[in-house]
Structure formats: structure tokens, C-alpha cells
Image: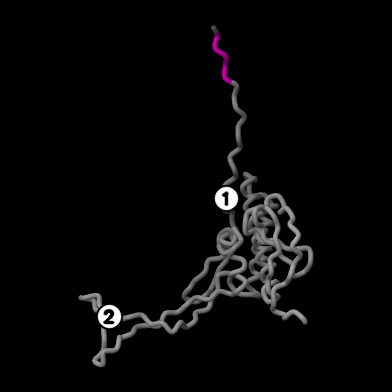
Amino acid sequence: MTERADGPQATPSTAVLAPEGQRWDGTILLGERPGEFHVVKNAMLEPLAVPQTQTRELRALIGLRDQARNLLEAEAGEAQDTPVLQQQRQELHAAYDAYVGEYGPLNRYELRRTGRFEKVLDEATGEPIRDEAGELVLGEESMARHRPPVMHTFKTDPHHALVMALENFEDADQSANPATFLTERALAPRPQVQGARARPRRSR
């Protein structure tokens, strides 16, 4: 029996310690083989089944996450906006542009009908208004936002919000522009810890 093309990709169930710096629960990591993913649970790597229809975009999201994290770490450790930092920022900007060019904005969604309508209430009494036949007067239909399935997979990652913040998204027309983080510094450098001074001894 052959596996469906859009079915989850199976991965070995061997427990492995997650890499240093990647041990937050929910972190999604790439496996060694194409289409293979892992998720961190209690500092251990566990297989994550991902449909083939999501694997390519999920890899792109993980790449954006890692580049964004590395840039923030670099900014926190550097007092000046060095050429290396500028190059990292430009590479992240380019990766974001490539993602949007292929998949669309990170925060994109579709509005779908729900079949549920808002009741029209009487302003004076707060009670639902009925027509002459006794039927409820209905207002606009409620719409539901549906995001791409891959976003539901990626949402478990603790740095999901960081990736979504790489753009400024407009709900009105579903347009997006790169966030300021992609063009200029976002973090001030970490303050350097000064050595503790020895207390002078009191004379007796």
C-alpha cells in the first residue's frame, strides 16, 4: 500500500537530545533527510509528521526564524552596526523577499463564509428585532479567517511571533511591507558586566 503524496512524512522515533540553544519546547528543526522534521519536547527531539504539501514552505519559515534569531543575537553582542551585521540584515531581507515572492505575505489569510449571521438588536431594549412574520432580523454574515495549514504547524514554534513580525501587514488589502527590523538595528547591545570590586578591609 503506497502512502498518499500529501500525507505526513514518517520519521524515526529514536529520542535524541536537541542541539544547544534549540531546546525550547515546540521548536521545529530540520531533519537529516529531505522532508524530515523534528520538534523539541523536554529538551529531546521527537519526530514531527508534516504533509508533503507543507514541507517546502515550512523549511523556508524555519530559515527565516534562524536568520532572524541570529541577527538579534548579533545585534545584542555588538555595540556598533558592523559590516557583518549589515550583511546579515541584507541576507534576511533577501530571504523575506524571496518567501513573499513565492508564497505571499507571512500573515496572509482567506475569509470564508460561516453561515452564521449577527442578530440585529433593538437599541432601546437590547432584544433581538423580529419582522412582521416573527422571524429574526439578521445582519451581516460572520466571516472566519483561515490561514494556510503550514502556519498552524509552525505556530507551535516559540519563535513563531518573531517570524510574523518581519512584516507590517495591512488587513484592508492583504498587503505587506518589510518591518523596520529588516532595514535598521532593532536591539541595543547588551550592557557589559563590570568586575566586582573587592571591599576594603576595615581596620581594627
> Which x, y percent locates residue 151?
59, 70
Give the overall secondary structure of the magenta segment.
loop
Residue 128 image label? 2
Instruction: Identify the coloring.
Output: one colour
- For the N terminus, the image quarter is bottom right
**Disc 1, SS:** loop
**Disc 2, SS:** loop
Q: Which residue sits at x=69%, y=69%?
A: 49
Is residue 43 highlighted in magenta?
Answer: no
Residue occupying the far top of the picture: 204
Q: Which residue sits at x=58%, y=72%?
A: 105
Sequence-wise, the earlier of marks 1 and 2 is 2
> Which x, y percent locates residue 125?
21, 75
Give the labeled residue for mark 1: 187
Q: Which residue sits at x=55%, y=62%?
A: 165
> Which x, y percent locates residue 129?
26, 83
**Mark 2: few, some, or many residues within 10 Å (few <14, many ≥20)?**
some
Left or right of 110 on screen, residue 128: left
Query: Which residue range is magenta in the image?
Result: 199-203
Residue occupying the far left of the picture: 124
Place residue 8 in its image quadrant: bottom right
Q: CA distance from mark 1 to mark 2?
A: 52 Å
Left or right of 36 on screen, residue 119: left
Image depth: mark 1 or mark 2 in front:
2
